[in-house]
Image (cartoon, rainbow, N blue to C red):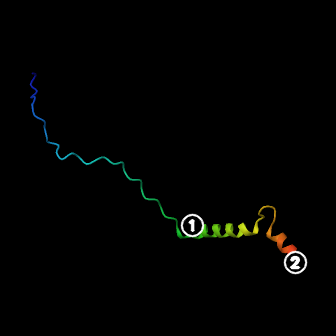
Amino acid sequence: MSGVAVSMFVSHDDWPPPPRWEPPRPPPRKRMSAAGEKFLLWVVGVNLLLLFVAPIAGASMVQLLWMLME
């Protein structure tokens, strides 16, 4: 052989085995600011209000009130 020592035994120098590889965790998501939360609540509130005021299936609340006043 050309100067390379060959061993007939298995080398256990790397025992215990290295820890299992895991992908890096994504960075934590940023929380919404207080102003952003307030704006979001306003948007949800307006949408809920429009749900009852907007025309639904061809009839609107304004027409209902108009009929009730007659």
- State the mark number for residue 36: 1
- Disc 2 crowd rating (10 Å Cα; few below 14, some 14-19, many 20+) is few
Residue picked out by circle 2: 69
- Kind of residue at disc 2: Met
Position in image of residue 34 (x %, y %): 53, 70
Position in image of residue 30 (x %, y %): 47, 61
Residue that appears at 63% across and 70% down: 42
- What is the quadrant of residue 27 in the picture? bottom left
Mark 1 to mark 2 CA distance (whole Å): 41 Å
- Up the image or down, 48 lies above or below 15; here it is below
Residue that appears at 79% across and 70% down: 61
- Up the image or down, 8 lies above or below 34; here it is above
Position in image of residue 37 (x %, y %): 56, 68
- Kind of residue at disc 1: Gly
Which numbered disc, 1 or 2, marks the residue closer to the eye? 2
- What is the quadrant of residue 57 in the picture? bottom right
Position in image of residue 28 (x %, y %): 43, 59
